[in-house]
Image (tube, rainbow, N blue to C red):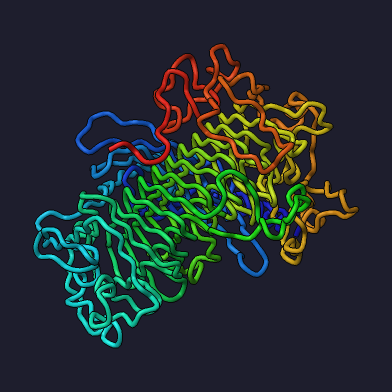
Amino acid sequence: MKRLLSASLLLAGLCAVNAAQAANTTTTGQIVLEPPTLIALSVEWPIEGDDNRNARVAVEYRRKGDTGWKTGHDLIRLQREEVFLRGALDYIAPNAFSGSVWDLQEDTDYELRLTLTDPDGVNGQDARSPVVQVVQAHTRPEPKAASGGRVYHVYPPGFTGPKQQPAFAGLLEAYYQAALGGDWGRASPVRVKAGDTILVHAGVYLSKRDHYSHEINSRYTTCCATPGDGTYYLTAKGTADKPIAIVAAGDGEVVFDGDNNTVLFNLMGGDHHLFEGITFRNTWIAIEAGQKNIAGSKGLSVKRSRFVDIGTAVHSDWSGSAGFYIADNDMLGRESLTSLFTWYAIKPWIDLPNFAERAKMKSFYAVSVYGQGHVFAYNRVRGFHDGLDHVTYGMPDDWPNTPRDRMPVAIDIYNNDISVMHDNCIETDGAMHNIRVLRNRCFNAALGAMSPQPIFGGPVYFVRNIAYNAWWGPTKIHGDPAGIFYYNNTYVGEFRMLTPASNLHLRNNLILGQGTNPRVLSVDTFTNYSSSDYNGFRVNPGAAESFAWNSPPKDVVSDYFPERKRISTEALPMSEMSRGPGQAEGQGRTLAWAQSVPLEKRSFRTLADYQKATGQDRHSILVDYSDFVNAPMPDYTDVTHVVDPLSVDLQLRKGSKAVDAGLVIPNVTDGFVGKAPDLGAYEQGQPLPVYGPRPR
């Protein structure tokens, strides 16, 4: 009997070992190629197993036909990270790899070579047998008016000069077979087809909303023939290579004036429209392109246009929106450009005179769009609540059975110049995988320059961005996001979080305390594989605590504490939520979520103490404002003050300790000068990025 029992125990032990090995080995699924953008390609590679997280996917890429391969950034490992916000979000990331290559050439064939290795074995083979997959992909071209299509000429009311033919009085007369207006406003069928171009000649196009819009009523209504809401409803269908183009003719400024209406252009029924060289003004929403669970458009492009005196430039929160291209535009909201304020009733703002009146929102966001494959690039954005946003949508449709064309993935936000935001410059909120936020400049943001609240699994890449005069700080991390990379950013302001994040990684950043929070770095994370290193920190003089790293106990890989789901933080003021776990002492209360999430709390006065105790930031250094050419610490004796971006130079001065102090990161530090990459957004010896609209 004893022998039989011993044999049974031995067999059970062998089975347990085999099961553990099976759980640690990797089985690969089918690679998914996400929608391409102009400069980036991205993939997802689902797997099973690899419970011990030691598998890796190396990335190489090349233009098709080239012989050599370039090294890309490794794919990020997703491992069932949780994203939760009571009443809105309850998400668990898939077991997978995901990632991007960027700064590619547009309209070009590429090959991506992915090599998956696992010391425990892959697909039943031993560790000496990696899986290598090569996928073919093509970057998108910039949307342009098609050649060979029909061309229609539109003139403003009262125009008496010579006209190019065929000529029409107002946009709708060219777009539809007629612009009858009034009771007949919906009678005319669409005239334009895919590939057609409407050339709009100089003048002001203003619909008289308070007139019965019919051609027999007055000469003014022949301009527009819009319904009583003054909205242009455009419902034709273009294609990606043959958009319906509405383009300024080049003989002077073209202005569409909304007469202070709610929506100027409604594209919810039309696909692949291109606006170029147009001025949109005097309206709440200049272009409405989608409403959640109702309808929306695909392939909207807006180029080299101006938005003036508006509430929102472009909006769509329809989940099927895809392939938008919003580039080289100048967007000016209705908020003051000389005095920065915010909407949130926290100190020190709430103590300012007339807070309730000054906190009223005059403009919302410049761009807020949900979906996939979007590009927001080279825009100048000023005077809004938010700048460029991915829509805060909630859970992806029908998750976990979301159709591929309804997943918010593969989005680029780059080289934008954003200033005077009463909340955030950029939000990636509610997106899933492969969001690239590259080389943006953010000045004068009251409540967090750049926000991932939340990210569903990731990755989202924040690379070489600038944040300055951002009172709350450079980031606003909320909603338990997962899968975030911060690389080579220059962040003036403390790096802090509202709720913990998972799978969070920081490298080569400059993070300078500005005195609005004691800690220069305060990280709360559910995953012990979050990491930080090769950064430069400026601690706040005299701070009792300068660094905090709060995570599960060291022998626990991750711990999401399901009991936290019963706790709501919505009623807590941001002034308390910003303090971090166990620090909400201002009103004698402790954070509700901190009570329910027993992360191991670790705070330190010095960088050396923090490095020794946590193992994080072992190669990081201390820096100061003197490391910049000309960038003083922001002066918050007046929190409403606005800083001119051209008055600050955040390049590293010669001899700075941050020069050559970074880590080589493929696709991020390519082309660095010297012994190693520099810290921060600017590499000495390399040209500065272009922010805002490019010269023609």
Q: Is residue 348 left or right of residue 241?
A: right
Q: Which residue is drawn at 25% across and 52% down?
A: 143
Q: Is residue 336 left or right of residue 402?
A: right
Q: In this view, does 151 lie to the left or right of 551?
A: left
Position of residue 543 measured from the top left corner of the image (x, y, whole percent): 81, 31
Q: Quadrant of residue 65?
A: top left
Q: Which residue is drawn at 50% across and 65% down?
A: 396
Residue 589 visible to the viewer: yes
Give 14 or 606, whichever is nearer the viewer: 606
Q: In which quarter of the image is residue 259?
A: bottom left
Residue 121 visible to the viewer: no
- Furthest-right residue in this view: 588
Position of residue 493 measured from the top left corner of the image (x, y, whole percent): 66, 36
In which quadrant is the C terminus drawn?
top left
In the picture shown, does residue 5 fall above or below 637?
A: below
Position of residue 625 measured from the top left corner of the image (x, y, whole percent): 64, 23
In the picture shown, does residue 176 fall above or below 603?
A: below
- Furthest-bottom residue in this view: 183
Position of residue 546 measured from the top left corner of the image (x, y, whole percent): 76, 32
Question: Looking at the image, how many numbered discs can be counted on the residues?
Answer: 0
Q: In which quarter of the image is residue 392?
A: bottom right
Give 572 or 330, whichever is nearer the viewer: 330
- Furthest-top residue in this view: 655
Give 251 or 445, whichever is nearer the viewer: 251
In which quadrant is the N terminus drawn?
bottom right
Q: Which residue is drawn at 69% across and 52% down?
A: 499
